[in-house]
Amino acid sequence: MLRAAAAARRAAVAAFSTSAARPETGLYGFDVLRTAKGFRRFVDEAIQRSDELVANIAQLPPAAEIVRTMDEISNTVCSVIDSAELCRNTHPDREFAEEADKASMRIYEHLQYLNTNTTLYNAILKAESEGALLSEESQKAANNLRVDFEKGGIHLPKDKLERVNQLNLAIAHLGRKFNENVMNKPGFVDIYPASRIPRNIQHNFKPISRFKPRGVEEQSNAMNATRQKGVRIVTDSGSVSSALRWASDEEVRRQVYVVGNSEPRENIGVLDELIDARDEFAKTMGCRSYAEFAIRPNMAASVDVVMSFLNDLSDTVRHKADEEFNTIKDFKRRVCNDKSADLEPWDEDYFIGMMKSSAHTVDPLVVASYFPLSQCIKGLNVLVESLFGATFHQVPMGDGESWHPNVIKLSLHHPDEGDLGFMYLDLYSRKGKYPGCAHFAIRGGRRLSDMNYQLPIIALVCNFSSSRGLTARLNHCDVETLFHEFGHALHSLLSRTEYQHFSGTRVALDVAETPSNLFEFYAWDYRVLRTFALDETTGDPIPEKLVKALNASRNMFPATDLQRQVFYSIMDLTLFGEHTSKPVDTISAVADLKRKHTSWNYVEGTHWHTRFSHLINYGAGYYSYLYARCFATTIWQEVCQGDPLSRSTGCAIRDKFLRHGGAKDPSALLKDFAGDSVIKNSGGGIIPDISSLCKEVGL
């Protein structure tokens, strides 16, 4: 591991120019976090500082000062919340992770106090009433802050407000419990003999063995038993995906699919409690359902608008998805020489993979040879330099600032504007780490004075193989994921808002995933890939023919992928929607929705949704991925596709979208960026135009 860390640092130095050392003394540069117990003081100081600011606001200063002071309270509290969230998900030291967990709950409880503080609420009402004295962004901030207070129930009678506070804390605890169960209780399948698993993926799984008698008549004689080798497949998402893609043994795939979609069982009850708590919370707030409460502030504005959009999209994609399903089924029957073979959910990845490989001769090992992780990180630098005229520089870290030897810190620097922000890269998998890929904010950007701006700090976290340090090679799906998360990172690093309340990804949920979806397109464009995807030996760029084959392979079953996303979105909206009876049988509800909205069977006894963490983070909001995909597809086709790496394209991306964070109305931003047709009015809300998406999918 230490050798891998050294390799990581050497490759990072090669990928980026280095700047002078910036000595820092605590985790993420916060001096107070020199030790794990520093989180206790971090919380104490945040509470003390926010109380001082509340006292200042109680004097009812001018409207602009009220808004700015409120934003400073938010900045103080969010610094603790965001740092604790990153730490508890990524820090290898259990003491740090546990102290961050405690700090997260303590500061969340204080946040509940602030959100129900009538002094602050009355002050923001005063500021909003004096809107003529404020800038456009300040007016929007005042309005958003008032809405946030009211979403916390501050306008309710005392007894109802107390119940809302109890429910908010319960919801936070249940969400944490759900995610911990996903991480800590993934389940496993033992496969004997090991030869049933392809050699090229056996290294992903734990080797096991057992004694197997040589014959029935010899079972009583241990000396006559032989040791049989096997593998244990821990059914986390990555291992399940690998086994379903490569295992030719259908029974192996079936076992992995069933166990992988039936754990953790504990989350059946956790989800039931969460649904009930969110439902009671929403009804206490005067809404018919949690979905109504969650969607009302967004562009969509109502559950009916979203559900109508999703049902229409489901109908639109169904015919082509059915055609794709039958194509896969016919292929399986030919391969298996069985004219009556049924196509099961555990067959999807395996046979689609076979069909793509045979149709387009895409060798995953050849593809991966062009994507060593060090080159992919250089690709990120190519993007920012070509589009924005900026470059990444590696920044040496002080003692205690990093949380793992493989972590590196980069500054995004512009020759005219100076440093734009800082990004930590934590890209390698390890035990106990958050299992997916994500963008974590640490500090939002905000205007401190006419001359000073608080620069954003973020972390980009992935889980790529660390066995060979930065010589690790990515498959193309990993490259796409890296670019997706980098889209989020750029949103944070390049926004320039007056208030951290609007910094970067702090936007309406409907558009939050738009930059990430947009930058996925960059991972598929030959003009982009040829700049960094180079042969490790010759230095030759990836052949255009190979990139065309990758794209052709990607485009083979687009309706199947789209249909799945529609199903996920409808499922999410249904679970947190109105219910005529309680408790909700989530297993039956999800099974019925899968039968109705997809071409695939539901496998009895499975409940994959109990590891679908988006139900926690995006409750009643998963539809926003489809909204964002529609927006990003239109933006790509109308703005970027002609010359994706030009400075003019970069200026449009930065100046018309990323710069504004959440400070401007998202519908106005989208129309200014991609044209009026990018959105449509529907039933009192806003939906995306789907014509660009239909063109991409071939509908």
Image (tube, helix red, strand yellow):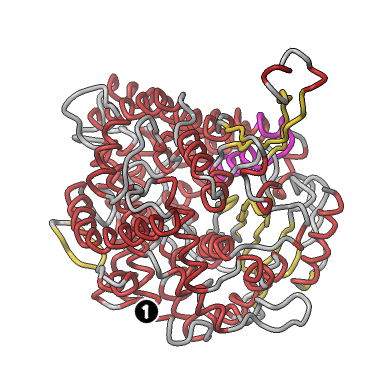
The number of numbered discs placed on residues in the rendered structure image is 1
Note whether 353 is above or below 242 in the view shown.
below
| Magenta-drawn segment | 77-99
For image coordinates 53% across by 40% down, the residue present is 252
Quickly name the residue at label 1. Answer: 637
Q: Nearer the viewer, residue 144 or 571?
A: 571
Assess whether residue 416 is covered by the magenta stretch. Answer: no
For image coordinates 18% across by 35% down, the residue present is 288
The answer to whether residue 489 is seen in the rendering is no
Extreme-left residue of the structure: 683
Percent from the top left, x then y, of residue 553?
46, 70
Tell me the element at label 1.
Answer: helix
For image coordinates 40% across by 43% down, the residue present is 60
Note whether 681 is above or below 268 in the view shown.
below
On the rendered image, what quadrant is the C terminus found in?
bottom left
Write down the quadrant of residue 420 in the picture.
bottom right
The answer to whether residue 552 is seen in the rendering is yes
Q: Three-letter amino acid code at disc 1?
A: Gln
> Alpha-carbon neighbours of circle 1 within 10 Å: few (<14), some, or many (≥20)?
some
Percent from the top left, x then y, of residue 488?
51, 60
Note whether 452 is above or below 205 in the view shown.
below
For image coordinates 76% across by 48% down, the residue present is 401
Left or right, 383 with respect to 311, comes to right
> Majority secondary structure of the magenta segment?
helix
Percent from the top left, x then y, of residue 648?
48, 86
Q: Nearer the viewer, residue 205 or 214?
A: 214
Percent from the top left, x then y, of residue 552?
45, 74
Left or right, 148 with respect to 315, comes to right
Assess whether residue 81 is covered by the magenta stretch. Answer: yes
Extreme-top residue of the structure: 220
Q: Nearer the viewer, residue 672 or 446?
A: 672
Left or right, 312 with respect to 539, comes to left
